[in-house]
Amino acid sequence: MTPSDVKATLSFSDGSPSIDLPLYKGSIGPDVIDIRKLYGQTGKFTYDPGFLSTASCASTITYIDGDKGELLYRGYPIEQLAQQCDFLEVCYLLIYGELPNTEQRTTFTKTITYHTMVNEQMQFFLRGFRRDAHPMAVLTGLVGALSAFYHDSTDVQNARHREIAAHRLIAKMPTLVAMAYKYGMGQPYMYPRNDLSYSANFMRMMFATPCEDYKPNDVLVRAIDRIFILHADHEQNASTSTVRLCGSSGTNPFAAIAAGVACLWGPAHGGANEACLNMLEDIQRMGGVEKIGEFVKQVKDKNSSVKLMGFGHRVYKNYDPRAKLMRETCHEVLGALGLGNDPLFKLAMALEKIALEDDYFVSRKLYPNVDYYSGIVQRAIGVPVSLFTAVFALARTVGWIAQLNEMIGDPEYKIGRPRQLFVGSARRDVKPVAQR
Ligand code: SDX
């Protein structure tokens, strides 16, 4: 962090002594005001529920410019990474900070490939769930359960343990997500194959059965690999902040990632892709494109809780660059599958066009986000709606790990422990029940 030569002076209208607060400059993006000494010097806290104006850490991993609609992983634009790299190269970049050369890429791919199997005991955890359990409930349990197996990589203070845990989590998430899917289908699990690429392996574990193998279609494999890249990391979003706060207690990485899975499930966050597809299917059932006006009216009605899922973002006040790439992938996949006239895709594009011309959305800077088109692509690939967020969690695991390791690797990190503005009862005495 670079100290700025600008200082912030905080003064109080009640004559309390003013204080100077140092500013720090990032390499790009907004400066920060260092308030670490504020409480000690003033006895006052800052107040920022939802952390709209709070930088929780200094990071070198992902940069978002919400106004420009720009997303960089370790400085590389998401558009270039999505078009020129595969997901494991992006994993290497997020974890180690640089894109791999040929030798590093070969070694990393081999390492990940040889960690894709899970302990045979893992299958018995699934049996405790009903077959119709939501895959995110299953995945939260399975990821947490990994803590029970890998005692040789749970000391987060040990850099080598952190690296092995990172490899294991990246490698095993596709296997666990596919197991959650197969369990819900009542089909046997498919073991990973070492002769397949990361994404082809995932597709085969999902769609092959012991009765008939599955030859992954290259266009679909490329599409799912791009979905993974687009969802890999996203600065200090809710689930990443959850992983950081959880990991700050020194808990093992599997437990911290399980906390991230649980947070991502929410419809305001990673659950939005499932909610968005359900929304599109509801509009389709109501009558399709002709009913968009009626639906948008509900969204704009303050008394209704209806939201245009897949639209809006805390940071992007412009088009989410991932949504543009996802829409492109939609075209490619639907075209390759002969579904160019897919009614849901046409409905989504019609709804997007109408929303982007409607002042309610324009004035609030509400644009499509990553979740708006990802559901249509996944549905076309054959991923069931209920598994969309689990696929998001699979992809985001590398981002969570990179962010967790960055925090733990910082000698200055402390356990996270926010304070509060207390607005409840002042001290009072308990009365005997007869007097209450
Ligand atoms: C992800 O943080 C990340 O980076 C997340 C993510 C990642 O990669 O990790 O990008 C992934 O979570 C993407 C977001 C997915 N969520 C959705 O698509 C759900 C629908 N979107 C909204 O719930 C909402 O836009 C949020 C939660 C995403 C952002 O909400 P904010 O920043 O808290 O903004 P807000 O709720 O205060 O909205 C401002 C105004 C409000 O109206 P007014 O009170 O000003 O009249 O915009 C309205 C909101 O009601 N609004 C919407 C809306 N989103 C915001 N109105 C209708 N439909 C929407 N989708």
Image: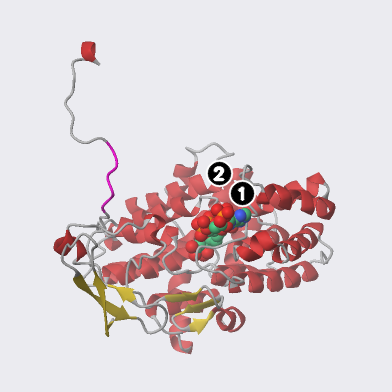
Q: Left of 421 or right of it: where is 314?
A: right
Quadrant hosting residue 244: bottom left
User: 226 or 46, which lies in front?
Assistant: 46
Q: Which quarter of the rendering shows the C terminus? A: top left
Boundaries of the magenta span? 419-424
In the current view of this chain or complex, which residue is farthest to the front?
Answer: 14
Q: Determine crowd level at label 1: few under 14, some 14-19, many 20+ residues with C-alpha closer than 10 A.
A: some
Which x, y percent locates residue 189? 57, 51
Q: Which quarter of the rendering shows the N terminus? A: bottom left
Give amino acid for label 1.
Ser
Q: Left of 16 or right of it: where is 89?
A: right
Q: Determine crowd level at label 2: few under 14, some 14-19, many 20+ residues with C-alpha closer than 10 A.
A: some
Which x, y percent locates residue 202? 58, 63
Q: Kindly tell me whether residue 278 is visible in this rendering.
A: no
Rendered residue at 22%/10% (across/down): 434
Q: Kindly tell me whether residue 321 is visible in this rendering.
A: yes
Name the main secondary structure of what is drawn in magenta. loop
Q: Which residue is mark 2?
A: 134
Which of the marked residues, 1 or 2, is nearer the chain's N terminus?
A: 2
Q: Which residue is mark 1?
A: 386
